[in-house]
Image: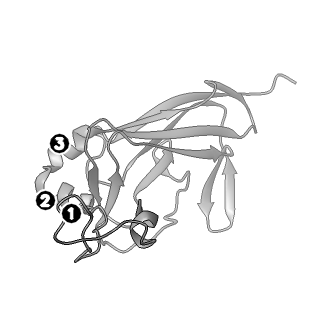
Amino acid sequence: MRRIYESNALRRDDDEPFSPRERETDPQAMRSIDSTSLSQRFVPDRLCHRAISVDVSTPRSTYPVGATIPFRVTMRNSMPFPITVTTRSPILWSWSVDGLTDAAEIPIHDPPAEPRGFRFDRGERKQFTKRWHQHFRIDDDEWEAAEPGTHTIGAGLNVADADEKGLYDETTITVEPDDS
């Protein structure tokens, strides 16, 4: 349509009611709304927390000793409008094994205590894939192998009391010793 107007193929006459007129202004592009600000101002935190679901899953429930254990963390916004969850730091979510963040007994991250927004579009599903190599980090350069038995892999958003707010999930896997 723009080519027709710019090519002068049409006769323009301001006095003729059925001929196009000269444009006085350029058409405006579709305006966008900052959904993060909108969500933070008008959607209460309680509703934001209820809108997001977290699910942790593994392909199998049993693994041999020494095998890498893949797991998937799926977060989904069930609302028909964008949601922004305010997190405690720039680290938006974390995972843990047996309650140890990033399967480490020492703190790995030292993020600033600056709140950030974790944005979910309407109906958006975010998936993250991680792997646990059946080792726990006990020092900067020292790792310890996990014992055979039951272990819990969990993940959640970086908010206070994520478990109570439904922003945390966990799954249980079993590490079986080799029979050889």
Q: Nearer the viewer, residue 28 or 98?
A: 28
- Could you give the CA–CA distance between mark 2 and mark 1, rounded to whole angstroms? 6 Å
Q: List the residue tagged with mark 1.
A: 37
Q: Amino acid at mark 3?
A: Leu
Would residue 130 be found to the left or right of residue 179 on screen? left
Q: Name the front one of labels 2 and 3.
A: 2
Looking at the rendering, which quadrant does residue 17 occupy?
bottom left
- Crowding at dot 3, Cα within 10 Å, few <14 / some 14-19 / many 20+, comes out as few
Question: Whole-Å distance between the Cαs marked 1 and 3?
Answer: 15 Å
Secondary structure under tag 2 reads: helix
Badges 2 and 1: C-beta atoms under 8 Å apart?
A: yes
Q: Residues within 10 Å of mark 1 (few under 14, many from 20)?
A: few
Mark 1: which amino acid? Ser
x then y, percent, for residue 29? 31, 65
Q: Which numbered disc, 2 or 3, marks the residue that appears first in the sequence?
A: 2
**Residue 66 in the image, given as x and y percentages of width and height:** 76, 39
Say what amino acid the circle numbered 2 marks. Answer: Arg
Q: Against 111, is 58 above or below?
A: above
The circle drawn on residue 41 is 2
The residue labelled by disc 3 is 47
Q: Position of residue 77 (x, y in %)?
A: 33, 40
Instruction: Identify which residue is drawn at 30% across, 72% down.
Output: 114
| 100 or 69, nearer to the observer | 69
Q: Farthest bottom residue?
A: 24
Label 1: state its secondary structure.
helix
Callout 1–callout 3 Cβ contact below 8 Å: no
Q: Residue at x 14, y 50 (%)?
A: 43
On the rendered structure, is 21 left or right of 124? left
Q: Report if residue 98 is visible in the image.
A: yes
Question: Is residue 165 at least partly visible in the picture?
Answer: no
Q: Quadrant of the C terminus?
A: top right
